Image (cartoon, rainbow, N blue to C red):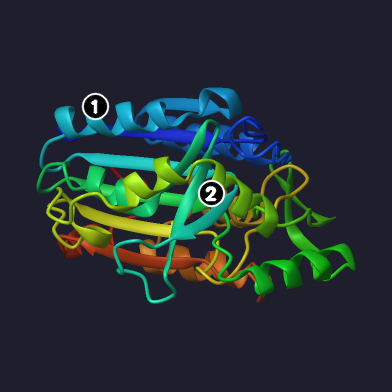
């Protein structure tokens, strides 16, 4: 029988000693992780959750090593992340905008290239679902635009905040992005560390962006690479929309339908992305989300 492993990460703060004195305080990300863990547990996954100080680079690395060791063809891996997103210089020229996207874990950023290399060690035939409720702001100019716009009420009112199990109108909180000056100071302070990751060998498992991955990897993210994801009162905007569409397990469609329905509930300035890398698996495409 197929088995499912899941990891749920939510950071309402990060370590200022790594991030140039910035703690990156957020409101809803720990709640997001708890909500996603609840879905996973209901669907039969063996779940693991790490919040704020517990959500370290080492935790993610150890979990993915465990997944590579324990999962076999037909199994399912679910990873959910809610927290700050950022970008660092792309040193291997695989990004059209010359920037690699990151997750801001408590003790340091994890770059998308290194994540894909770790996914590359996962066995042929494993299905992987990644849900990332984080920002990938394209440029400092765009990031500053969103920051000013949000401060002036640009985020507006949305009806996808969650109060218990009920949708309620609420003003969205600010975007989950690292201010450009903090991003630059963090990179300069830890340049040798991030450059070493960026120069990892191209023939490592998983290749660049997962082209050589044996597993079937699916990402549904909170926004496009040139957009920002928003925090919220109870849950972040993307996670709140996902919970409404999931409807306590009453949703019966496939992944494409799931993505489309989430997108329809969100502001036009935050459009969830849906893409696949690795081995194509059309049966996986047709499954109900979270199915083991």
Q: Give 81 or 241, whichever is nearer the viewer.
A: 81
Regarding mark 2 in the picture, which secondary structure is present there? helix
Q: Give 283 or 16, whichever is nearer the viewer.
A: 16
Percent across and percent down for residue 230 are: 68, 57
Quadrant of the snapshot with the C terminus: top left
Quadrant of the snapshot with the N terminus: top left
Q: Give 23 or 29, whichever is nearer the viewer.
A: 23
Q: Is residue 26 left or right of residue 33?
A: right
Q: Tag on residue 261?
A: none
Judging by the rendered image, the residue that carries numbered circle 1 is 66
Q: First in sequence: mark 1 or mark 2? A: 1
Dot 2 crowding, Cα within 10 Å, few <14, some 14–19, many 20+: many
Q: Is residue 180 left or right of residue 79?
A: right
Q: In this figure, what is the number of numbered marks?
A: 2
Judging by the rendered image, the residue that carries numbered circle 2 is 187
> Residue drawn at (38%, 76%), measured in percent from left and top?
96
Regarding mark 1 in the picture, which secondary structure is present there? helix
Dot 1 crowding, Cα within 10 Å, few <14, some 14–19, many 20+: few
Q: Is residue 169 left or right of residue 238?
A: right
Label 1 to label 2, Cα distance in Å? 29 Å
Compared with residue 99, is residue 71 higher up or lower down, i.e. above or below? above
Compared with residue 279, is residue 74 higher up or lower down, i.e. above or below? above
Q: Tell whether label 2 touches label 1 (CB within 8 Å).
A: no
Percent across and percent down for residue 182 are: 67, 50
Compared with residue 17, is residue 125 higher up or lower down, i.e. above or below? below
Percent across and percent down for residue 241 are: 61, 57
Percent across and percent down for residue 205 are: 14, 48
């Amino acid at each position: 029988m197929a088995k499912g492993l899941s990891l749920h990460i939510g950071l309402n703060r990060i370590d200022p000693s790594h991030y140039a004195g910035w703690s990156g305080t957020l409101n809803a990300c720990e709640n997001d992780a708890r909500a996603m863990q609840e879905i996973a547990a209901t669907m039969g996954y063996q779940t693991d959750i790490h919040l704020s100080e517990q959500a370290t680079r080492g935790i993610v690395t150890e979990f993915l090593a465990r997944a590579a060791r324990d999962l076999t063809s037909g199994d399912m891996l679910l990873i959910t992340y809610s927290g700050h997103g950022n970008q660092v210089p792309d040193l291997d020229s695989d990004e059209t905008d010359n920037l690699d996207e990151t997750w801001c874990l408590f003790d340091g950023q994890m770059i998308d290239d290194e994540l894909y290399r770790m996914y590359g060690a996962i066995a042929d035939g494993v299905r992987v679902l990644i849900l990332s409720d984080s920002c990938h702001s394209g440029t400092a100019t765009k990031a500053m635009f969103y920051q000013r716009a949000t401060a002036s009420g640009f985020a507006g009112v949305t009806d996808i905040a969650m109060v218990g199990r009920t949708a309620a109108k609420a003003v969205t909180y600010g975007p989950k992005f690292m201010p450009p000056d903090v991003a630059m100071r963090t990179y300069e302070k830890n340049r040798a560390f991030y450059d070493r990751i960026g120069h990892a060998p191209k023939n490592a498992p998983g290749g660049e962006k997962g082209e050589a991955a044996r597993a079937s990897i699916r990402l549904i993210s909170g926004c496009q690479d040139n957009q920002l994801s928003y925090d919220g009162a109870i849950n972040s905007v993307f996670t709140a929309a996902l919970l409404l569409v999931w409807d306590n397990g009453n949703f019966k469609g496939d992944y494409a339908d799931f993505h489309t329905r989430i997108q329809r509930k969100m502001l036009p300035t935050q459009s969830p992305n849906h893409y696949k890398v690795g081995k194509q698996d059309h049966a996986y495409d047709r499954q109900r989300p979270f199915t083991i």
